[in-house]
Amino acid sequence: MKLDHINVVTDRLAETTAFFIDVVGLTTGFRPNFNFNGAWLYGDADRPAIVHLVERTPDAGGTGPIDHVAFRSDGLEAFEGRLQSHALQYEVRVIPGTGERQVFFLAPFGLKIEVTFPPA
């Protein structure tokens, strides 16, 4: 079993889409013609879309039991540069025994995001 996608509800679709493109490094792509606004974002040129955005006002209470959403990538230094250029605070942790590095930060709409990078 693999993670298929995360679904994020936002009343700021353009800003949220730009965040996932400019900061996280995803790209927009095919999205079915639903009867509501949204966007599908991809980590690779191939499917599946790993982030689905839906434009509507989020329900009160935030993300409930979801603590964070995690992605896997390469190029830690370039990624840190993108976070810094967007003035986002972040924390880097090293996973014991593996050397993998985790970067944690908050999206402007309140979602905690982790991006894991291979050992240095």
Image (cartoon, grey):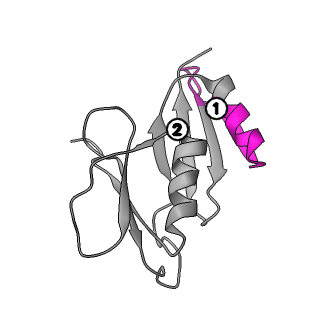
* Residue type highlighted by circle 1: Phe
Residue 112 lies left or right of residue 27; in this view the side is right
Q: Is mark 1 on a helix, strand or loop?
A: helix
x and y percentages locating residue 36 in the rendered image = 30, 75
- 7 displayed left or right of 72: left
Q: Can you identify the residue that label 1 sits on?
A: 79
- Tell me the quarter of the image containing the C terminus: top right
- Between 95 and 57, which is closer to the camera in this rendering? 57
Q: Does the magenta stretch include residue 94?
A: yes
8 relative to 103 in the view: left or right: left
Q: Residue 98 carries which label?
A: none
Q: In this view, does 32 lie above or below 62?
A: above
* Mark 2: amino acid: Gly
Do labels 1 and 2 touch, CB within 8 Å? yes
Residue 116 magenta: no
Instruction: Tell me: 57 left or right of 48.
Output: right
Q: State the SS at label 2.
A: loop
Query: Which residue position is annotated with label 2?
Result: 25
Image: magenta residue range: 79-101
Query: Residue 13, position in %: x, y?
Result: 49, 66
Check disc 1: other Cα within 10 Å, few if <14, some if 14-19, many if 20+: some
Please give the name of the residue rendered at 59% of the width and 44% of the height, measured from the top-left corner. Answer: 22
